Amino acid sequence: MTIYNFSAGPAVLPKEVLQQAQAELLDWHGSGMSVMEMSHRGKEYMGIQAQAEADLRELMGIPTSYKVLFLQGGASQQFAMIPMNLLRGKKSADYLNTGEWSKKAISEAKKFGAVNVVATGADRNFSYIPAFNTWQRDANAAYLHYTPNETIGGVEFNWLPDVGTVPLVADMSSCILSRPVDVSKFGLIYAGAQKNVGPAGLTIVIVREDLIGEVLPGTPTMLDYKTHAENDSMYNTPPTYGIYIAGLVFQMLKRKGGIAQMEKTNIAKAKLLYATIDASNGFYNCPVATSDRSRMNVPFTLKDANLDGDFVKQADARGLLQLKGHRSVGGMRASIYNAMPLEGVQTLINFMNEFAKNHG
Ligand SMILES: *Cc1c(COP(=O)(O)O)cnc(C)c1O
């Protein structure tokens, strides 16, 4: 039976990447050792990391005026590092509140400065993105932070906020590499790797150089972007194996036609799944506003929540795993990142149609 893993994160990785890692596990390219065992300052490993960075730059079209940092601590550590590094003498930062991850970023930022919440989706249970013309922005904000894809609520931006000269900061943990983005429009992009890139333990930060170097007093060395920027992410031991796997993913993406090609497949997958939900006569329901529905994380409920347990059990039996929704939302959630093949979504919707027919 083919297994399809719909986990929100850590999430499915491309099979061919895992197979390559397996083939190279004990002896990387004739080095006689595993990547895990290599000195991070050795020629072999330095080559792996440099190639990973070059490939990511190529895939995303990252301008040379941006640093690419390979860090640890997860996206959650960025919730603190961003205000510590980017307040830069200003008193306040703008934050958009579109759900669970926005809220965490906001509460952490409040430890370091004032937070101006420009708009919130709380009035409709975070099922939509507040229209840009309702945002109460502060012209003097140090930066504006938003979450382009809310992994739990399944709300995703299909547009780019134009905040002028205020640096735009985006938590792309669950949408990085899923669609093309114009990096030059951002001050900083960050993402935990474990959704759409690689294994947990690696955090990617892409930051415009001129924003680096003016941290809050007392900022620990390890939490200063400058430390990592000046040392090619090798101030201390980087998460070497995670960077290696991410590098294999980048090479695979390049072979497959890059991010534009990924986006096409991602649109096709999401369309199929939402169409199934919408055509179910209310048996399935997705609470998210049609224009703001995520291509990556598709939350849906069953008309009768008493059927949830059966749904999950029967899905499991067919190799459709990890569909149970986040504890804060309930229902189901299908995460359909880059590495989820179209056949996985087709198998899921066949099952959903059959389940609805048997229980409708
Ligand atoms: C998963 C996730 C996080 C948290 O990531 P960690 O690496 O576990 O800290 C933050 N933001 C978003 C949008 C996420 O999906």
Image: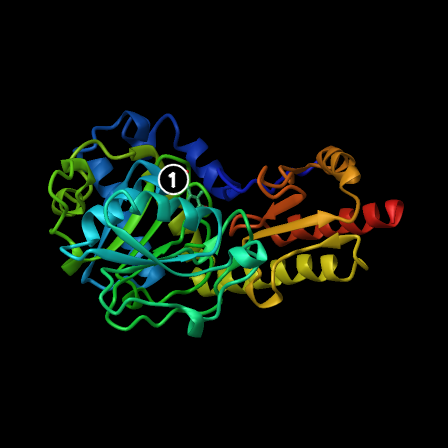
Say whether residue 317 is left or right of residue 97.
Answer: right
Q: Is residue 294 visible?
A: no
Is residue 291 shown above or below 301? Answer: below
Element class at badge 1:
helix
Image coordinates of residue 65 in percent, x first then y, are 18, 62
In the picture of the structure, the residue carrying the numbered disc 1 is 245
Q: Residue at x 31, y 39 (%)?
A: 77
Q: Quadrant of the N terminus?
A: top right
The residue closer to the viewer here, 2 or 168, is 168
Q: Residues within 10 Å of mark 1 (few under 14, many from 20)?
A: many
Q: Residue at x 82, y 45 (%)?
A: 355
Q: Residue at x 30, y 68 (%)?
A: 185
Q: Residue at x 55, y 58 (%)?
A: 123
Displayed quadrant of residue 311: top right
Say whether residue 1 is left or right of residue 70.
Answer: right
Image coordinates of residue 170 in percent, x first then y, are 35, 56
Say whether residue 240 is left or right of residue 176.
Answer: left
| Residue at mark 1: C-beta within 8 A of ligand 1 | no
Identity, as a three-letter code, of the amino acid under mark 1: Ile
The residue closer to the viewer here, 91 or 46, is 91
